[in-house]
Each structure stands twice: as C-alpha cells, then as structure tokens.
Amino acid sequence: METGAIPLNHVQHLQQLVRQRTVVMGILNVTPDSFYDGGRYARLEVAVQRALQMVEEGADILDIGGESTRPGSQPVSEEEELRRVLPVIEAVREQVDIPISIDTTKSRVAERALQAGACMANDISGLGFDPRMARVVAQYGALCCIMHIQGTPQTMQQNPHYDDVVRDISGYFEERLALAERAGVPREHIWLDPGIGFGKTVEHNLEILRRLRELTAFGLPLLVGTSRKSFIGRVLGDLPPEQRLEGTAATVAIAIMNGANAVRVHDVKEMVRVARMTDAVLGRDG
Ligand code: 7PJ
C-alpha cells in the first residue's frame, strides 16, 4: 500500500493556518472548457506558470482540476482527467512547496494525485459520486473538502428546490460526515463547503452567504467558492465572467465576515488583499 507520498507537513500546516486566518485557495483549471479561464491553461507550461504566479500572489493552496463542473457540462473519462492533472501536479511539486488539492469526484484520480503529492481531495460531490472516494482519503491521511451539491452538474440548475436551503445543507453535511467517519476519515481532516452555484438559484446563493454563520456549528473549517460565478453576473445586470471581480470581492468579504475560513478564487492577488483586510477588521492574525 503506497501512502508515502502525501506531504503530512502540508496537512498539518493547512490545519493550523485555517484556524488562524483566511486561507486563500487558488483555482487552476486544466480543462479546455472551463467557463472563465477555459482552454487558456490547457498546455502544461502555461498551467505551471499560472500556478507559480498564484504562489507569488499569496495563494496558500492550489486547487487543480481536470473536469469542468459548470452547469450542463459533460463528464470526462478517468484517463483524460489523469492526463490533464497529473503532469501539472508533478511539475508544480517539483518547483514550489505549496499544498495542492485535487478537484475531482473520482477516487482513482484522487488517489493518483495524492500519490503525486497533493494533500487534499476537493470533491464537489461530497464523497457522493464515487463510493470508494472516502476510503482513498482515509488511506492517504489526506484532507477532504465535502461540498454540497443538489443533483449533478448535468442537471443541478434545472429546478433547484429546498425547504430551507441552509438547514438542508446542514442535514447533508451530517450525512456525509457520518459516511466519511465510517470510512475512517478523521473529522479533523474535513472541511465543509456549501457549494455556491451547485443546484442553487440566485436567491439560494444570496441566502447561503447571508446565513453562512449557521454552518459554523459543525466546528469545521468552512470553504466558500463564489469566484466569478453566475449569480454575481445576474445580480449586477448580466455581467460576463470577466467583469465579476468587484462582485467577487464583495462576496469574499461577506463570506469571511460570516464565518468562512477559506475562499476558493481565480483572482489570487486581489482576493488575498480582500481576505487580509477583512481578517484585520475581525482582529484575526494576518
Ligand atoms: C467550487 C468547487 C466551489 C469547491 C467549483 C467554479 C465551478 N469546489 N469547484 N467549492 N466550484 N470546494 O469554479 O465556478 O464552490 S467549479
């Protein structure tokens, strides 16, 4: 059983950091069809350059993903996902000492990424699509982000419905935490994420941000990903993704004020400043 590759120092470092100040997770999509930086970082060198730039800009962790999860997007095969992400993870690990999370719903992709030096699995299905995912996370001693989604990326925006969006998300977290613990993932290794945009209307997303504090009851780090998402475009009068920077900044500050411990963003330089400023107001260690 090969479990030697995962950098335990990265796990420990992140666990300490996320309880101290806002952790900024930089997004690195290695997909030809991502809605914002789609195709641009498809080539290895370009992807690695962007990774190094995000490190320079102050990212605390890089989230590397090879499958687009935008609404209506089509799944990619395990082989294709591995072809996209593994060379990037390996090259980044060779060049900089930065914690890496693998953005995937597939246990085999997570496993290969953890073997290549990632320390966290960011699963937008909250361990729900691949029944082996929780065991892989447990086996490698990795961190794990359990994100809430209603439905699948193919269907989630068709007719999102909740009795009470925040209470329903809490119930889902309870279930998935139990599943993770049964598989042997220690509770201290888990982060929670309400999954902004994943089976939610504009109103649902705004309500989640307004009531985010309720989700801190689990006592686990809360990750929030609003970066350039469509609800921002809609609120601001149908702005396209490249004009959603200020709206993103507002949501990042609000998320932190309301209890977020980590934010997943495209614009690392700008959002590090937003996070530092908000942390200062909260009297948090910078
Ligand atoms: C999220 C994610 C998020 C976590 C994406 C996009 C869509 N992972 N992966 N949280 N969003 N944990 O970046 O717009 O909100 S993909």
Image (cartoon, rainbow, N blue to C red):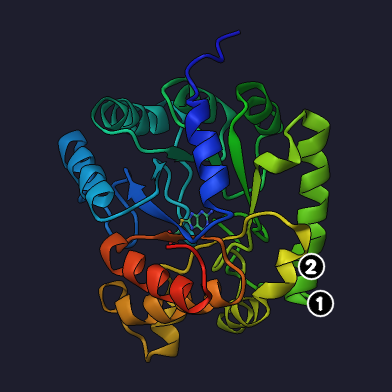
Residue placed most toward the observer, 19 or 191: 19
The secondary element bearing badge 2 is classed as helix
Residue placed most toward the observer, 159 or 25: 25
Residue located farthest toward the bottom when viewing the structure as drawn: 237
| Quadrant housing residue 132 | top right
Image coordinates of residue 225 in percent, x first then y, are 49, 63
Image coordinates of residue 129 in percent, x first then y, are 66, 41
Q: Which residue is mark 1?
A: 163
- Looking at the image, residue 156 sits to the left or right of residue 68; the answer is right
- Looking at the image, residue 83 sits to the left or right of residue 253; the answer is left
Image coordinates of residue 57 in percent, x first then y, are 25, 55
Q: Which mark is residue 168?
A: 2
Q: Label 2 amino acid?
A: Asp
Residue at 51% x, 43% y: name it.
14
Residue at 80% x, 71% y: name it.
167
Image coordinates of residue 162 in percent, x first then y, are 76, 74
Distance from mark 2 CB to nearest ligand 1 atom below 8 Å? no
Q: Label 1 amino acid?
A: Asp
Residue located farthest toward the top when viewing the structure as drawn: 1
| Quadrant housing residue 93 | top left
Specify which label sits upstream in the sequence, 2 or 1: 1
How many numbered marks does the figure carry? 2
Q: Quadrant of the C terminus?
A: bottom left
Residue 39 visible in the shown view? no
The secondary element bearing badge 1 is classed as loop
Residue 172 visible in the shown view? yes
Distance from mark 1 CB to nearest ligand 1 atom below 8 Å? no
Q: Is residue 13 above or below residue 142?
A: below
